[in-house]
Amino acid sequence: MALKRVKGSIDRIFDKSLQDLVRGIRNHKSNEAHYVSLCVDEIKVELKQENVAVKANAVNKLIYLQMLGYDISWAAFNIIEVMSSPKFTFKRIGYLAASQCFHSETDVLMLTTNMIRKDLGSQNFFDAGIALNGLSCFITPDLARDLANDILALMTSSRPYTRKRAVLISYKIFLCYPEALRPAFPRLKEKLEDPDPGVQSAAVNVICELARKNPKNYLSLAPVFFKLMTSSTNNWVLIKIIKLFGALTPLEPRLGKKLIEPLTNLIHNTSAMSLLYECINTVVQVLISFTSGMQDHGSSIQLCVQKLRILIEDSDQNLKYLGLLAMSRILKTHPKAVQAHKDLILQCLDDKDESIRLRALDLLFGMVSKKNLMEIVKKLMIHVAKADGSQYRDELISKIIEICCQNNFQYITNFEWYISVLIELTRIDGSSSHGGLISSQILDVAIRVKSIRQFAAHQMATLLENAHALMSQLHRNGMEEVLYAAAYICGEFAQFVESPDCLIHAMVRPRATTLPSHIQGVYLHNIMKLYAVALKRAEDTDDKGVGLTQSLQEKLPIFIQSSNLEVQERASCILTLLKYIEKLQNKGLFEVDEFSCLFKGELNPVAPKAQRKVPVPEGLDLDAWINDPPSSSEDEDAKEEQKMEYERSYNDFYSPTSEKRREYSQEELNKLREERMVEQANNPNYLMSKKAEGYMNPDEESEAGSINLDISVPLHVPGLPSSDRYFKMEQDRRRRQRAERVVKKKKAKRGKHGRKREEQEEPEEEEDIAPVHAVEIVNEEMPEGAVKTDSEDENPSFDPHKALDIDLDSPLTASEALPKPKHRESAKLIIQEPEKKEKPSKKKKHKKEKKHKKKHHSAPVESLLVDEVDVDRTVNGHQHQHVDQQDAVQVKKEKKEDDLSFWLNDSSEKVEEPVVNGVAVEDDKATQKSSKEKKRNKKAKKSKRKSPEVGETPPPSEPQIQMSRYTVLAENKDMRIEFETRCIPRQEKKITVSCVFSNLSSSFIKTIEFNVLDTLNTRLIRDGGNLSHDAVQIPFSLPPSARNECQLEFTASSVTMPQRLKGTITYMVQDDTKQHTNQEKLDFKLHLPCSAYLMSTPLSSDRFTKLLSSGEVTDKASYQFNNTDMSLESMLQKLCFYIKFAVVEQIGNSASLYSSSIQKHHVCLLVKSVGNGISIDGKSDNSSLLSNIMDEVKMVGKT
Amino acid sequence: MIKAILVFNNHGKPRLLRFYQHYTEEQQQQIVRETFHLVSRRDDDVCSFLEGGTLIGGSDYKLIYRHYATLYFVFCVDSSESELGILDLIQVFVETLDRCFENVCELDLIFHVDKVQYILAEIVMGGMVLETNMNDICSRFLEQDKLEKSEAGLSAAPAKAAAALKNIDLPSLPKDLKLPDLPKLPSFR
């Protein structure tokens, strides 16, 4: 046998190996395809051999061919054969081939399920590794469903190598089989605390990917991640977590508050640029989420911007790029901070790297102000002129326009300048796709800025008159569209045109027929408008416009020949009209006014979405047939055709830009050019300018009448504006203005310059630059009753992540169990066994044991070994437990939310320290644990958990109150006020009392005023100037059954005594008819216990012992709870929660706790469980504080 | 997520392609061509990030690449990856190759593309970063190599001898990929 094998392999030693194939292909460079086809034939023969080694070799070669672009899907079955080989060597080749060419459509994949399952459970962990690796590339919904369980089992494998792969692939499983997410999630969450950093990193990776798409479902994990962030040293993990927080903060601003400090610390301390960069990004996210501006984070933003400046100034282009990228994120919310670095960003515009230039362009958008707009645009214009590559040029052009028109032209002070910039843009060499954009901008400005119309009409008239000269240049630049705008403006505002008849003559030149037809259409229509004005002006002359009528009649027939229906029809109409007018004119009956009233009335700008927003009137069914539906369908095709034809012409008419331009053949072009040359030579109006300063020095114009139009120098037509000129004018004007203003002692006020736009609010330090003209930007018209909507253009598109938008906190149901494979291999079960032993923390073990017990309890028949995999499934499989569990998990969910909200709300204390978070997290665990107990026995739960916050209040409506320290301050039939005290970090004499006002009545409550009688020690802080007995206005009113929170600050000179303050709340109740209001009064006593002044301050055990031995804390007090059934654990929890202690350390049955007051008093507690009681010894440096705290401890212990 | 990893030489010849999303062979080749076109016209002293590429990418995706002597290593990633992190990952990948092949050069990648794939499989799995510790990656790869050798055993001897014979005439090209130092980048190890 062995001999046979050796002989077989000797036979095959002259088979081509992969190396031979590669070498062969390299040697046949000229006829690679031929050589490869020969090789493929060989491979096909090899694949038919029985020897797996030969097959594997063949497949290995196929992998190489696949890389070169040859299809190898025909060998899919052979690949599976190789995959199923027991030898690792071949298996690996097989899986590699599969991962390269299999995909979800590959049908042979359904054959692989069992083989993959076997490999996953293989003794050789490399087999599982390559199987997982392959699977990650070709997983299908079917495979995911069938293998979900096996992979879930591998997540607890004893080898980190396998574990981390299993964790990573779970993401792919969830994508293909979303039902697996919920059952698998608890295990995934566990892996966040895996002892192996690789596994941990993989789990973070997966959750980050999941949370990126559906962040809200993962908010409850924030405390866990927070802890990881403060403890992990792995930069990969840190970056992922920080990115994740960036996705979470928009959903929960309180989270941002918590994050800002550790993140700024990281920014200060880290040396890793990548981490620094991600921190800055997330801080920016956080700051964006603080839209309310309740806190000033100027320093954080400054820090970010400074660090980014360092990045941008770095010689490393990568850092420069990233710096600019992050800057643009800041720009959206904090433009001022970025504006300070204008110099730097302008500098980046000159960078040789296009990526960097593009990023800098993005930033420019927010850099502009009234003052520097012209300057910046001028700079950009220079860039446009010398830009290489049309893509970058287009980008520049669109940016210039975007910058200028942002916020309804907020920064433009001189619209003459803007129009001239736009016109200049049309003459910059090089094709561009932004002709339509420029055209629409010109239209927009001319129509909406009334005072510019005259100027625009002049400019456009000049442009049209010279169009024949500019046309080829415009065409080359892709800027013909601008003639569309020009024609429309000249027609619509014809009263401003100096000599309409000249313009008409210019527009009907035969050359115009070479324009795109939609422009011709606009030409024709506007010729009529001009004609009306020309006639009106000619009224007083002898001619009375007869000559114009006649010459127009001569010129128009050329348009009737147009192939475009629109042009043809308009031309015909006009011609008929002209004939009629001529007749009347000859009879002397023609009334100009009658004719010009055809074009009376101003067309107002209409918002682009106006049509869509017209509300459908009631009772109108747009889908209903107006006439009876056609009975037969025989001529449907014809109709369809008609309809299409109609639509096409309709589109021609209404969306000119979407129309195809006419392409000319070479002959045509030549012919046209000839025509043009002749025409130009004969045209006395045609002027050629030699170089730039056309407008300034008209005398210098060349008289040589150069006919060659394809010169590369941009044409400058006299009369067309130069933006530079306006730039200079504007600067002069500003200088003058400033001088005037100095004279007038800065009395220049906005009102002086006529009515201006509302948005024109400028930063104080910026000079108020008055616009040249009294500018009135007409707002676009919207239909009456239009409904405001924000997102209108959302296209629903398929996204696999949508399926993963799954609530992870709600209970598992029986139907959600992962499908069980029919045969379970014992080998796999044994593998899971050792995993239990290596669980790291005591807690977890504890938990595991509980699970274990539960499992035992519910499904004693099944093997214990299955337990790890099956906990959820088996428990859920039992229908009788289902309802009970539903309830329990409901509670669990609420508890979770509460924990999160508690964790987040704590931010007023110094919670940033990890230890406290540890407490919070443990708390979380404890509640989870307890809820699991609940699962088992609901009744037992009630007797065990005595804490008042759980049972009493109905959970669904008021989740926050449940786990908070809020206590009722006062209550009557109208409203209830609850309060909570909070310390302000680094404020020694202030505390905040946060009051929640709930309206219990069905009426509107307003004008709430809050007042207390100050004591010597404790005073309410009233807004400046108010006397000490004035009431504080609560800044909101309450609609029926609404709640709102208001924070009031108190000063306290001493914190060692509890305080009771008498107070009153007055408010107005508005009755339903809204006509009568009654003033009501509500008295209360505000009790501020000493614990209100305590801040939970984490302390290391070393420092704690030092403190105790230092002799600073001398006062002692103690108390003992006898016969209490409270556990030490829950006692500690209560002390931490209600009296704000922090656990220093816990050893066995005793724990030491520490807290300090806002005035730096130390309070230390030693809590011991003795027999069936708990003893508490306290030490402090202030006896009165200590005794008051001990009193509170007693109260807490007894509740 | 990493969408694709492409390695090609200065002439655009693919040396390693790994797509974590299905594309047909034809599309793959087109992506390589397009990416090569984008990347090759950039100087060596400009930044390593590229937006664009119509075939692969979209607004959320970026091309992050490094150029080593004759080879381009291009990663196409979405916004959930850290840009600098990926740059470092490329470095890890190349350094690992350097270690596993002892002074890696383009020829190693040409003739042992399968091995390169196996090494990559230790670093990235299904588009997600699996391991960044170079020692781990190397030792896992070498262990698997050893396993393969032990499986081959006696029967592989003749084939090996034949391969050695054939390999004698391999053109002896300079064996060097020139690893640039990355002082600015953080080490993730």
Image: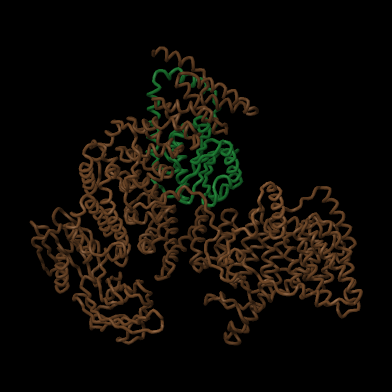
Look at the image and name its color scheme: by chain
Residue at 43 percent of width and 20 percent of height: B156
Asked whether, in this view, residue A923 is left or right of residue A585, the answer is left
Q: Is residue A709 visible?
A: yes
Asked whether, in this view, residue A598 is left or right of residue A365, the answer is right
Q: Is residue A1112 visible?
A: no
Viewer-side residue, A304 vs B79:
B79
Viewer-side residue, A317 vs B31:
B31
Which quadrant does the N terminus of chain A fall into? top left
Q: Identify the hue of chain B.
A: green
Residue A303 rendering spot, x and y as whole percentages: 43, 64
The total number of labels drawn is 0
Asked whether, in this view, residue A739 is left or right of residue A530, the answer is left
Residue A558 rendering spot, x and y as whole percentages: 85, 59
Viewer-side residue, B122 vs A1032:
A1032
Q: In this view, does A627 lie above or below A822?
A: below
Viewer-side residue, A1006 vs A363:
A1006
Quarter location, residue A218: bottom left
Residue at 32 percent of width and 73 percent of height: A998
Which quadrant does the C terminus of chain A fall into? bottom left
Q: In this view, does B74 lie above or below A712?
A: above
Residue A868 rendering spot, x and y as whole percentages: 27, 40
Quarter location, residue A482: bottom right
Asked whether, in this view, residue A195 is left or right of residue A653, the answer is left
Residue A953 rendering spot, x and y as whole percentages: 25, 65
Q: Identify the hue of chain A.
A: brown
